Image: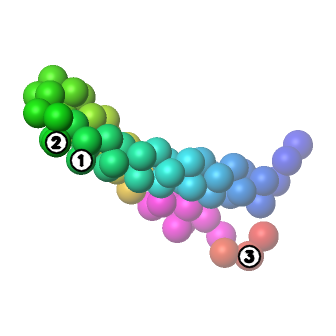
Amino acid sequence: MRGLGWIKSIRLAEAQQMRDRIALLECELINAAASKGKSNLLNVGHELRSQKARLERLEHCIAWMPKRL
């Protein structure tokens, strides 16, 4: 069985992937706004809000994990 250190490293990697996805979505949002595609703009905006909320919850979870493992 793996310990808390393993779980924390998984969560940290997941948070980094989310940050990368958010950066990509922000670029897509800028491109969608420039192309005046309202449908795409709404879809990207919705996914961006969802990813930011998910990242916030994950960071809160990571913050409550023990610092030293």
Task: Tell which of 5 and 44 is nearer to you.
Answer: 44
The residue under label 3 is: 68
Q: Secondary structure at mark 3?
A: loop
The quadrant of the image that shows the N terminus is: top right
Magenta residue check for 23: no
Image vertical order of residue 62 relative to residue 35, above or below: below
Residue type at mark 3 is Arg
Q: Is residue 33 visible?
A: yes
Classify mark 2: residues with Cα within 10 Å, few (<14), some (14-19) or many (20+).
few
Cα distance between the residues tagged 2 and 1: 6 Å
Q: Disc 3 vs disc 1: Cβ atoms closer than 8 Å?
A: no
Q: Disc 2 vs disc 1: Cβ atoms closer than 8 Å?
A: yes
The residue under label 1 is: 30
Q: Going 14% across and 28% down the picture, which residue do you hit?
A: 37
Residue type at mark 1 is Ile
In the picture provided, is 55 more to the left or to the right than 11? left
